[in-house]
Amino acid sequence: MVQSMCNTDTRDVQATVKQIKALEKEGCEIIRVAVLDMTAAKKLGQIKRQIQIPLVADIHFDYQLALEAVRQGVDKIRINPGNIGSLDRIKKVADACKEKKIPIRIGVNSGSIESRILKKYKNKVTPKSMVESALYHVKLLEKFDFRDIVISLKAPDVNRTVSAYQLLSEKVNYPLHLGITEAGTKWSGTIKSAIGIGTLLYQGIGDTIRVSLTDSPIEEVKAGWEILKDLDLRKRGRILISCPTCGRTQIDLIPLAKKIEKATENIEKPITIAVMGCAVNGPGEAREADIGVAGGKKLGIIFRKGKVIKTVKEKDILLALMAEIKKL
């Protein structure tokens, strides 16, 4: 499932709900919000009642915020039990979540490992130290017979993240939430996340994902879906395939591909659209596409499942292709 996190102030219910609804439309399936204080915690119920997808309360250190989030009816809590104080406090949170059947996500980042564990690994954040930290928090919950647990292990680089999840997957059967933390801006962060998340999903590791970008949460959801679609794990919306162009290309293909990408971005039906530069190889190379266009000399050949259905002038390609897409 594709997850994201609001970048609004949770205390501003209107702004937060507006962003969540936009994310729902984009395909977000789980949404997380930051709970900074008790005022934010008390707003969770209002937010929950106005949205359609599960709401996760992101909490650090303060067990009272977790208890209030439970009272407000959230669907999941993200909190590390080892950071909220005494065993009595951990038990209160575990018991409250158990009573309401609310899962707890333990989130270990490379920057949140306990000092005693870091010392053991010579102050180096390694996959083993990340896993040890996660298991420490898991055991604290298991101590109170709480096992409705999700775990995430995130580092800002691919190698440590992948290795940590691989190691953890051999030790536990709990669901795993995947992501590369602090991945970066839209362009570099998407590439980094696709490599890390994609590698793990290809190996059958992972249950939910979040692409963490220094950008709009909308872009996180878009990237998450592209990863799932490219691995053929989920189907939602169109898949666009296009050639990189070469010396045989005789139409202005790059801007055309961008226009087609923009014009079809809101299609929800899982169809494949091909944008090819060469009329000789285009229909053949993209014969499995539901619909597509291949360029000729200032013209475009529109084809369906590899079969040519019409030829149009270059200036008419976009309108003609969209008309055929609507028929699908």
Image: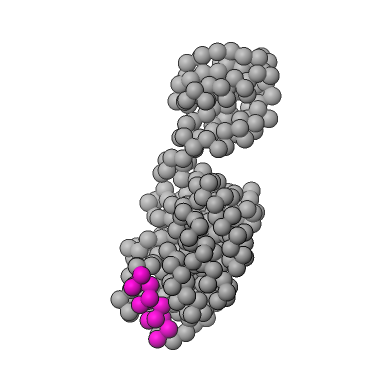
Left or right: where 165 falls relative to 277: left
Q: Quadrant of residue 34?
A: bottom right
Magenta stretch containing residue 125, yes or no?
no
Q: Is residue 216 above or below residue 268?
A: below
- The x and y percentages for residue 80 are 46, 74
Q: Is residue 313 left or right of residue 233?
A: right
* Residue situated in front as seen by the camera: 209 or 45: 45
Residue 323, horizontal then vertical, whole percent: 56, 22
Q: Residue at x 52, y 78 (%)?
A: 61
Residue 100, image quadrant: bottom left
Magenta highlight: main SS? helix
Q: Position of residue 20 (x, y in %)?
A: 55, 55
Q: Is residue 295 left or right of residue 53?
A: right
Question: In the image, residue 251 lies at what x, y percent?
Answer: 67, 21
Does 81 sit above or below residue 191? below
Q: Residue at 33% x, 70% y: name it.
A: 147
Per the rendered image, the range of residues in magenta is 88-100
Q: Nearer the viewer, residue 2 or 46?
A: 46
For image coordinates 52% across by 35% down, the residue present is 267
Camera sees residue 42: yes
